[in-house]
Each structure stands twice: as structure tokens, then as C-alpha cells.
Amino acid sequence: MSFVSLGEVMVQFNPLSTGPLRYPKLFEVHVAGSEANMLVGLAKLGYSAGFISRVGNDELGLMVIKTLRGEGVDVSRVKVDPEAPTGIYIVQRHFPVPGQSTVLYYRHGSAASKMGPEDVDEDYLREFSAIILTGITPALSESCYRAVQKAYRVAKGHGLDTIFDTNIRIKLWKRAELAREKLREFLGAKIVFTNREDLAIIFPETPLEEAAHKLIDTGAELVVVKLGREGAIAFTKNNETYKLQAYAVPLVEDVIGAGDAFNAAFLAALYRGLGVEKALKYGVAAGALVVTVRGDIEAQPTWSDLETFMEYVEKKEQAHVR
Ligand code: KDG
């Protein structure tokens, strides 16, 4: 099993202190972006992964390429754009809502936003067995939207499994209706990851379970609704439902990237043949690990990390019961 994806990866500036961004003086630098995060997670779990993107001809672009390569992702299709810069974003942690993070994007006109259908090489896609796309890339520009359309169509045509995370970023779309309208065509992917907020945008005023079933009616075989601290629910086309509580972790540094880590571990377990229930378990474990550090990719687990974490949680639970 091998995974290909298309999207923007940025340099993330994450303050060492929490609170309003006016004040921190010290920032840590990370490489992050939803699609690339998932590929790194999958690579750590033993799968091959390839990324299609563009970065600027600048030091930050070099950092992105070097980091992804170091994590085992094939970057042969990451182009270096001589004119546009690498995108960046800054994180504000635990303010104004404790436990949550918000982001400031500086990515308008970035190298990745200039991607288009010409970046999607059909022969390259055919080297993989599954494609992962998200609702972020179509929001970057009209040409990125067309690139995602092409990738989705070509992948379906060549029999790749299609995986789509709705990942609606209102800061990019500006209007919820636009996201709803433009993302509709990707909702029939084989596996759809989403969350409560995105479902409310896609199917307004529809109860969560009904909305998930609407996605199944659209063609999805498996719909996974991530619920943050509450865990996740999976709905299958065979009418099965699986629900799992999240693992509580003593320390939440930064929640950004948890959803991507969840997806990666969920997919890794599912494609290893472990079944949906076990996949949910690995997914929430990976999500729990990622929130304990700043940065999206650093704490993504290997199989052995997942086993160690799960043993620790089980021991804690048993001690609690006694
Ligand atoms: O899922 C985490 C991502 O949201 C974060 O890394 C930044 O890719 C990003 C985005 O577009 O929001």
C-alpha cells in the first residue's frame, strides 16, 4: 500500500509561550501542512508516500523539502518556484480558548497556491495505490482547485483508493457556502474524514448521524467523524457504527495536527487489515500523542510508540478501576 497526496506544506512558527501573539518573543520553527502531515504519519508507520507540491526558491522551501525527505516522503514532485515564496503560518496557543489553537496564515500568493493541473502527473499517480486529498487545497486558488479535481479524477480512473478529508478552513474560503459548493464533488471518495463543524457546513441543520449517512449515500464506503476530545465515530456502508472515546492526556501543548495524525494512524491500521474498531483506537492514540508537543509531525508515532502508549493507557485505566 502506498499513498500520494497534493497540497501545501508551510513553515509553522509556534511561540514557546501561550497567549495573544502580540507578546511572545521566542518562536519554534516546524514544517507542517495537513496533507504532508498525513504522509509523514504514514511513512513513520511503514508505508511509502509521495507528495506533489510547490515551494519557493528560498531557505524555507529548502527546509520543507529537507524535512519531508528526512521523514521518508518522496519529494521528487515538489517543484521549486523561482518567483513565489514558501507559505508560512503562525500559531496562537491556548488563547482566548484554553486548550485550543488558532492560526494566522501568510500564504496568499505562495508557491503552492500557484499549483495547477499541470502539476498532477498521471504516470506518477499510477505508482500509488491510494490518494489523499483535503478541502484545504481547493481553497488556495482556482488553479489549485482544478489540480485537485484532476488528481481526484485521474486517481478514480486508475483505480486508486480515494481518501478525502473535508478539512474546511473558513479563513481560506471566507464563505461557508463556497466551501459547500466546491467540495461537493469530492464527497464520494471511498473514505471520507470529517468533523462536526464541517458536517454542519456541508449539510446545514442536519443531525450528525444523518449527515454521515448522506455521505455514504453519495458513495463513501467509510465515513469517519472526528470529535476532538470526545473521540471519533466511524460509519460504514454496511450500516455498522463504531464509536470510541479519545484518550485523555495530561498535557495539551498544541492541538494542531492531531486530526492528520489520527487519519494517518487510522489508515495505517485499516490497510494493515486490523478492522475499523482497531483503526479508531490507533487513530485516537496518534491524535493524543500529537497534542502533547508543539508542531504537527514530530510526535507522530511509529507502531512501537503506539503500542507503548496504549499499554500505558491500559495500565492507568486498570489502576483507576481497582
Ligand atoms: O491540520 C493541520 C493543518 O491545518 C495545519 O498544519 C496548517 O495545513 C494547514 C492548514 O492549511 O490549515
Image (cartoon, helix red, strand yellow):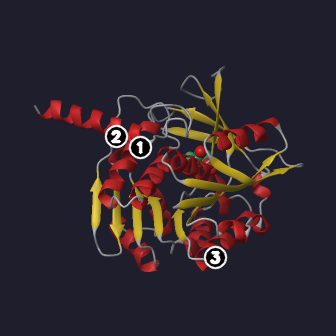
Q: In the image, residue 75 lies at what x, y percent?
A: 71, 50
Front: mark 2 or 3: 2
Depth order, front residue of 301/140: 301
Q: Quadrant of residue 277?
A: bottom left
| Whole-number angstrom distance, CA of label 2 to CA of label 1 | 6 Å
Indicate whether 115 appears above or below 213.
above
Q: Which mark is residue 153?
A: 3
Question: Cβ–Cβ below 8 Å for labels 2 and 1?
Answer: yes
Question: Residue extending furthest left?
Answer: 322
Q: Amino acid at mark 1?
A: Trp
The residue located at (66%, 69%) in the rendering is: 151
Left or right: residue 238 compared with residue 171: left
Cβ of mark 1 under 8 A from ligand 1: no
Q: Which mark is residue 303?
A: 1
Secondary structure beneath dot 3 equals helix
Other-residue count near label 3 (Cα within 10 Å), few / some / many at <14 / 14–19 / ≥20 = few
Q: Quadrant of the C terminus?
A: top left
Secondary structure beneath dot 1 equals helix
Q: What residue is shown with label 2? A: 307
